[in-house]
Image (cartoon, rainbow, N blue to C red):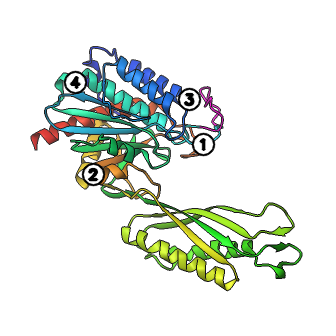
Amino acid sequence: MSISLANEERTGTLSGSSLLESKLIAHRRELHQNPELSNQEFATTQRITGWLNAAGVRILDLGLKTGVVAEIGSPDGPLVALRGDIDALPIEEASGVPFSSQHPGVMHACGHDFHTSVILGAAYLLKAREDQLPGRVRLFFQPAEERFGGASQLIKAGALENVDVIFGLHNAPELPVGTFSTKGGAFYANVDRFSITITGKGAHAAHPEEGVDSIVTASHIISALQTVVSRNVSAQEAAVVSVTRIEGGNTWNVLPQTVELEGTVRTHNDAVREQIPERIRQVISGVATALGAKAELHWFGGPPAVVNTPRWADFSLEAAAEFGYKTEVATAQMGGEDFAFYLHHVPGAFVSIGSASEFGLHHPQFNPDESAIYPAAAYFQQLAEKALRELTEK
């Protein structure tokens, strides 16, 4: 991949890409060893604050409990925001890397340590060129993305005030290092969660005729839920209904009275999203009634779809191609991202950066290629400057 390092060579504080790359990898490994769950990122916040303070980057006082918002550049002119996320997952690490998590049961299995290091790198590069920026760049180090609450926290605190455009990233383990992708319009999915409580009548396992079998009912409901998409949603639309947890009973010879199911629904089209809860309710009620049981749906609406502004998605792709990335127009994803909330307020684009991990996101052996960190940092520095110039000229 051909990457321009001219900006870094002009900083006066960095002697070349190898120095900054080593620094960013060290940051990433320190974060990886010390992961924290959503809204518990206190030490992570302190680390990021310390690194930014040491670089002379001003930090905005927004009253956040966790997370950091910083700013570089002149108050005159447009304002571009760059967002990274900082929280980890409740996963026991099995990657075997020498800098594995020191916190049992908690791991950066989604690459938020990677994202944080990229935006830190962009901050360092932008700070070195601060007097040349035709405006400001605001840097979001957002907590609680995995709980889909962090973006709303930052918005409520005022982080989006006066922002003209926002960009964010996710590493893509399925893409090679040096590959970049995004698309205009719907990119990531609407994310909703549901639980279903099935109530039957408990009985001895040797005498099922004396009860109402909640486990058999649950089994039929799980199968029937697959028709919610296959027989109710057009084949031209993207939708997924997945049951991810089933819990019922506590011994081998008793039919339990209740069973609980839990799962998720993913969609891109808001009209499809709106029709699915009622269809699930009809299906589970009909199946349960036919088998003599009752079923109750509990619905938890999550973040909306990430809908990239076409202008800025194209802009980020063009900038990536100029930078030296191999660019691809992405296919729509069924994963979710609370970056969507920002895009409900300001235009922008969410992008994918290839990280070439053998194991995918949320896997205990997930291990992104660290050689992708520095180029991504340099790209976001150049993207922010290019966007500032675009906004100034317009």
300 or 241: nearer the eye? Answer: 300
Residue 99 on the magenta segment? yes
Q: Return the mark for residue 34.
A: 3
| SS assignment for the magenta stretch, majority | loop
Alpha carbon of mark 1 to alpha carbon of mark 4: how far?
Answer: 38 Å
Q: Return the mark for residue 130.
A: 4
Q: Does 174 appear above or below 247? A: above
What residue is disc 2 on? 345
Tell me the SS state at disc 1: loop
Question: How far across and down, in percent of the image, does residue 281 sit?
Answer: 54, 76
Position of 263 compared to 176: left or right?
right
Residue count near mark 1 (Cα–Cα under 10 Å), binned few <14, some 14–19, many ≥20: some
Instruction: Kindly give the residue lying farthest to the right in the view shown.
Output: 206
Q: Where are the magenta residues, as a range?
A: 95-106
What residue is disc 1 on? 90
Tell me the SS state at disc 2: loop
Looking at marks 1 and 2 on the same chain, the residue that comes earlier in the sequence is marked by 1
Looking at marks 1 and 3 on the same chain, the residue that comes earlier in the sequence is marked by 3
**Foreground tag (3 vs 4):** 3
> What residue is drawn where x is 52% and y is 25%?
30
Amino acid at pointer 2: His
Alpha carbon of mark 1 to alpha carbon of mark 3: how far?
Answer: 13 Å
